[in-house]
Image: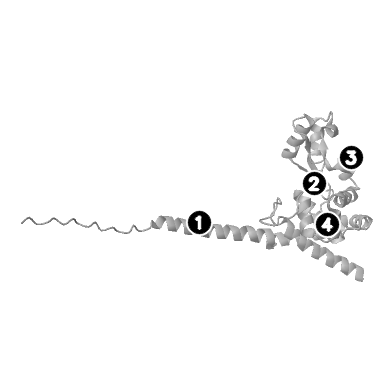
Amino acid sequence: MAKKKHKKRSVRTKKRPNSRIYHGLGALFIFGALYFGYTYYNSHFVTPWQSSSDKAGFASVVDNYSEDVQTAAAAFNLPYPYLMALIQLECSGIKPAGERFEPHVFRRLQAVRDGKRKNYENITQSHLANASDAALKNLATSWGPFQLMGYKCILLDVQIRDIRGDRGVYHGVNWINITYGDRLRRGEYKNCFHMHNTGRTYPRVGMPTTHDPQYVPRGLAGISRYQLKSETNNAR
């Protein structure tokens, strides 16, 4: 009698997970955690070297701008400590303040002038009729203690020489009053610093979009510093 042939059962072995994948995911997680921690710290707290720099510029802001800011703050009913802290962020208290050309703004203004773009913020082609490239460069440059872009003079109905001249503080505070003065009077300092630098309120989710991640926390720290200075002067 022939013996039945038994089929050999194949033994399935469990595949071991690729350790390289797990190591890669672990490294990615650690990198992400470190990156998030670094960016969060830099956007919410003032680093020692930034704090040192701000303290060094404090005297310059007081010496060069305090009187003009007090006058403008009273005229528009806006907080003196915020305006002083903002000047420190924007020009470090230097007088006369420096200037900064923004090539991307220049290109957008060119597009508006040439009819390739409908508008840029409140600027339309009618505002730029016959404007030369040299004129557009001035409009695309930030001026004065609050570093207002040149084209902001159109909203204020003044000349660029006005916002960068002796009345620069007054015109800068006037612009602040028009654009976000109500928020400032309500004490929305975090939103106001972010708006001055980006044109938008502070993000509800995610990191700030300011050119310097510490722009807002430095500004908030500056308010406390100038508030204390103001209270000390009033107590004398």
Q: Which residue is mark 3?
A: 159
Q: Amino acid at mark 3?
A: Gln
Left or right: 7, with 181 as reference point: left
Residue 120: percent from the left, percent from the top? 78, 38
Q: Amino acid at mark 2?
A: Gly
Q: Using the rendered view, name the quadrant where residue 165 is placed.
A: top right
Q: Using the rendered view, name the quadrant where residue 11 is placed.
A: bottom left
Using a 10 Å C-alpha cutoff, classify the residue at mark 1 as few (fewer than 14 neighbours), some (14 to 19) or many (20 or more).
few
Q: Nearer the viewer, mark 2 or mark 1?
A: 1
Residue 220: percent from the left, percent from the top? 77, 61
Q: Which secondary structure, mark 1? A: helix
Q: Which residue is mark 2?
A: 98
Q: Earlier in the sequence, mark 1 or mark 3?
A: 1
Q: Earlier in the sequence, mark 4 or mark 2?
A: 2
Task: Using the image, determine if residue 198 lies above or below residue 118.
Answer: below
Q: Which residue is mark 1?
A: 28
